[in-house]
Amino acid sequence: MVADADTLMRQASMTADTYLREVVKSIDERFGDGFAKSNPVLMSAMLQACSADFAATMLSNSLDRVADAIHTGLSNMGALSEGFA
C-alpha cells in the first residue's frame, strides 16, 4: 500500500467513524436500541478490539510480503550463485 501522510490521516478518521457506526449497530442489535449510548465502556472495548484486529491484520500482511521478498531474494541469489559454480 502506498499513500501519503495526508491520505492516511483522512482514512484513519474514516476508519474510526466506520468502526463507531458498526459498534453502535452491533451492540444495539444485541441488547436493544440505545444500549450502546448508555454503555460507553462497552463501546470503547469493542472499538479497541476492532482497532487491534485491524492492526494485527495489517502487520501480518506486511510480514507476509517481507517473507515473500526474502524468499524470492534468496532464491534469486541461489540461482545466481549456481551460474558461478
Image (spheres, rainbow, N blue to C red):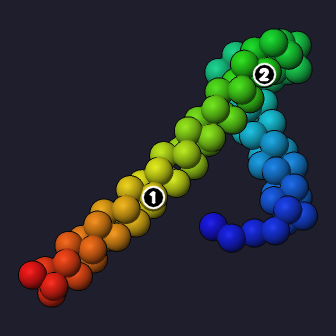
Q: In the rendered view, would you say 6 is above or below 84?
A: above
Q: Residue at x 47, y 50 (%)?
A: 63
**Circle 1 crowding by C-alpha within 10 Å: few under 14, some 14–19, many from 20:** few
| Residue 55 left/right relative to 69 | right
Q: Amino acid at mark 2?
A: Met
| Residue 70 left/right relative to 19 | left
**Which image quarter is the C terminus in?**
bottom left
Q: Amino acid at mark 1?
A: Val
SS under mark 2: helix
Tell me the number on the disc at residue 43. 2
| Residue 16 left/right relative to 50 | right
Q: Could you tell me residue 56's position as x and y percent?
A: 56, 38
Q: Could you tell me residue 25's position as x and y percent?
A: 74, 34
**Circle 2 crowding by C-alpha within 10 Å: few under 14, some 14–19, many from 20:** many
Q: Residue at x 34, y 70 (%)?
A: 73
**First in sequence: mark 2 or mark 1?**
2
